[in-house]
Image (spheres, coloured by chain):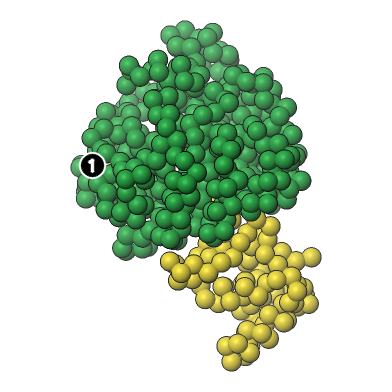
Chain colours: A green, B yellow
Amino acid sequence: MGELVMSEADVSTVPTLSPPLWLLAELTYRCPLHCVFCYNPVDFARHTDELSTDEWLRVLREGRAMGAVQCGFSGGEPLLRDDLEVLVAEARQLGYYTNLITSGIGLTETRAARLKAAGLDHIQLSFQDSTREINDLVTRTTTFGLKQQVAQIIESNGWPMVINVVIHRLNIEHIGRIIEMAADLGAEYLELANTQYYSWAHVNRDQLLPTREQLIRAEEETDRWRAKLGDKMRIFFVSPDYHEAKPKKCMNGWGNVFLTVTPDGTALPCHTARMLPGLTFPNVKDMNLKEIWFDSEGFNHYRGTGWMKEPCASCDDKEKDLGGCRCQAFLLSQDPDAADPVCPKSPHHQIVQDIVAGADSRAASGGDAAAPWGTEQNVHPLVFRGPKESLGLLSKP
Amino acid sequence: MSQESIDLSRRPQLGGGFRLQWEPAQNCHVLLYPEGMVKLNQSAGEILTRCNAERSIADIVSDLEQAFQASGLSDEVVAFLNLAKEQKWVSWS
């Protein structure tokens, strides 16, 4: 799934707590793919409950009544829910702009026609690479040809063509060909989202993190294509936090714009927040969305700047970046209240520098940075996202 | 594109993938597009609600001048539509 962006002027100047603008409905954790960078929680196999159709319909109504305007259906693979058309139709009728965030697996002509009739506004289709080899390897499937067909189905239904590609060390050298592929498919928007290291991507970080040099080359190549394509296709290049050395205003502020509901009904300020220790998040089965958004401890905990410790508390940029990402702080420093370690002012910043330097030195010693995994020394094999692997990782942090 | 070069007989319509609606919670018109939203000020909202592929730019101007009992709105409307076209919020052939 891509980064979900609202233009900044919409949200940054509001003095009082506003309702969410974005409702992200993660309909299921089930997925036919096994992507090594999946952002679903590594323990997803422990959360197999899924809200019923009626429960989702209630969530959609409550969100819209509060003023949410964007509704995303994601997963896992949302097309695995047979009631997707029912949910889309209700969301559209309520006045949401409806976004389906999908791998495309399961989007047949018939299903597409039903979604079109339901009023679906937009499909964001993910691609893994420009090559069959890498697509099939990182997903542990044979789905490359299928995705090309799905792109044609999207185009023939008149939906805007929006393509998202997660970028990492195994495909970053192909970035020019990826852009060319997207242009050939008629994409209007292409998001080149460098992997951020949470969940499964965090488990596989050593194999996925590109070198600094690779990243610079990829940005240069992207700029060349931007110049070549003009305004035919807009390309968003999302830099990885580790290399940026600049904390991001994660989710545009905790509990500020986004409300995610997980398959089992847990409401979260972002889709990975469940990993944070010491916080409890409410379930939509027990509380309505309004109470959840305005009153719950989970949503209030990291709102604003009152929770901060040094160096954030006295930092001039604290309103600008809100201390960065809480999940990243926890994953890298084991302290969810710490400054995001990607910030050079963080006392844990050396950890990030060491990780990036590690990617550079592995590339230097291993020769070809795009070498297939398993050929490098001192790196565990890639862990593919799947129920068995999920349960196997439960004993680890 | 300079303002003089705009042909006032063009009939603008909302760009593909964009949707315009009134949001009570925001108390304004908003333009929705894949995964995003633009909040519109009153004049932008009034102009875009009239972009229906049937009215020409000249029609839109005179309609607005009538609705708001104003005159000389042409420059402002043309300037906004130029910007809107650049952003792909509207298109015309």
The residue positioned 78% from the left and 77% from the top of the image is: B9
Residue B16 in sight here: yes
Image location (x, y in percent) of residue A206: 45, 19
Image location (x, y in percent) of residue A320: 35, 52
Q: Is residue A94 above or below residue A99?
A: below
Image location (x, y in percent) of residue B60: 68, 80
Q: What amino acid is at disc 1? A: Pro
Q: How many marks?
A: 1
The chain to which mark 1 is attached is A
Classify 10 Å Cα crowding around label 1: few (below 14), some (14-19), many (20 and above): some
Rendered-image quadrant of the C terminus of chain A: top left
Q: Is residue B26 above or below residue A379?
A: below
Residue at image mark 1: A311
Return the residue nearer the eye: A116 or A251: A116
Which picture quadrant has residue A220? Answer: top right
A125 sits left or right of A41 in the view: right
The residue positioned 71% from the left and 46% from the top of the image is: A113
Image location (x, y in percent) of residue A299: 30, 47
Residue A173 in sight here: no
The residue positioned 53% from the left and 43% from the top of the image is: A73
The residue positioned 60% from the left and 42% from the top of the image is: A124
Return the residue nearer the eye: A386 or A265: A265
Return the residue nearer the eye: A16 or B73: A16
Return the residue nearer the eye: A335 or A19: A19
Report helix, strand or loop for mark 1: loop
